[in-house]
Image (cartoon, rainbow, N blue to C red):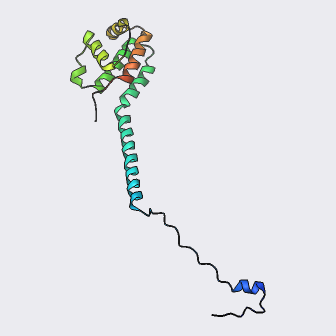
């Protein structure tokens, strides 16, 4: 196809040009299978992380509930002891906790708490707490909060 360009103005020559073809759209799909595998692995890891987080929150809901009740306990020794007992009943098998009292109850708390160090006076006040209506020793409330936060539970899945 020959076109006579002699005697044509520059504008006329420009009008004769054909537009450049548009490039094909770039695909957003990975070009190799490795990227697909990586995407599947990442999605799996994210799903596992979300599941683990939800499971952790569900298994520790009793701790959050006990701590909120402890904050509203008005420094009552009897209520503090009751909250501690209920938290232990949720965290450990009933037959292991329900029958404990006195020194056995204190030994259980010490064994399951890990590395708590409180004066024996504080632990002893916990034994007497359900039987008297007196303000809690501040150390008793601290002991209860620390045990609720740090004890090692036997419950794995529910």
**Front-most of residues 52 and 158:** 52
- Count of marks placed on residues: 0
The residue under the point 29% across, 12% down is 106
As drawn, which residue projects farthest toward the left? 95
| 67 is higher (above) or lower (below) than 51 | above
Q: Quadrant of the N terminus?
A: bottom right
Left or right, residue 94 beside residue 124: left
Quarter residue 39 falls in: bottom left
Quarter residue 86 falls in: top left
| 36 is higher (above) or lower (below) than 139 | below
The residue under the point 36% across, 40% down is 52
**Front-most of residues 62 and 18:** 18
Q: Where is residue 45 in the image (x, y as percent from the top left)?
A: 38, 46
Left or right, residue 97 beside residue 75: left
Q: Quadrant of the C terminus?
A: top left
Q: Where is residue 105 in the image (x, y as percent from the top left)?
A: 27, 14
Q: Where is residue 76 in the image (x, y as percent from the top left)?
A: 41, 13
The residue under the point 42% across, 57% down is 35
Q: Where is residue 143 in the image (x, y as percent from the top left)?
A: 39, 15
Quarter residue 13 falls in: bottom right
**Front-most of residues 57 and 28:** 28
| 114 is higher (above) or lower (below) than 13 | above
The residue under the point 73% across, 91% down is 5
| 3 is higher (above) or lower (below) than 47 | below
């Amino acid at each position: 196809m020959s076109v006579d360009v002699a005697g044509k103005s520059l504008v006329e020559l420009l009008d004769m040009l054909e537009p450049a073809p548009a490039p094909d759209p770039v695909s957003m799909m990975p070009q190799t299978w490795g990227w697909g595998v990586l995407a599947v692995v990442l999605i799996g890891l994210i799903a596992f992380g979300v599941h683990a987080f939800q499971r952790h929150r569900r298994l520790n809901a009793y701790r959050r509930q006990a701590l909120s009740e402890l904050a509203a306990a008005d420094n009552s020794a009897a209520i503090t002891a009751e909250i501690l007992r209920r938290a232990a009943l949720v965290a450990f098998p009933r037959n292991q906790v329900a029958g404990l009292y006195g020194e056995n109850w204190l030994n259980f708390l010490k064994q399951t708490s890990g590395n708590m160090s409180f004066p024996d006076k504080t632990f002893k006040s916990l034994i007497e707490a359900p039987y008297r209506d007196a303000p809690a020793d501040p150390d008793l409330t601290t002991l209860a909060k620390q045990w609720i936060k740090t004890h090692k539970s036997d419950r794995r899945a529910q």
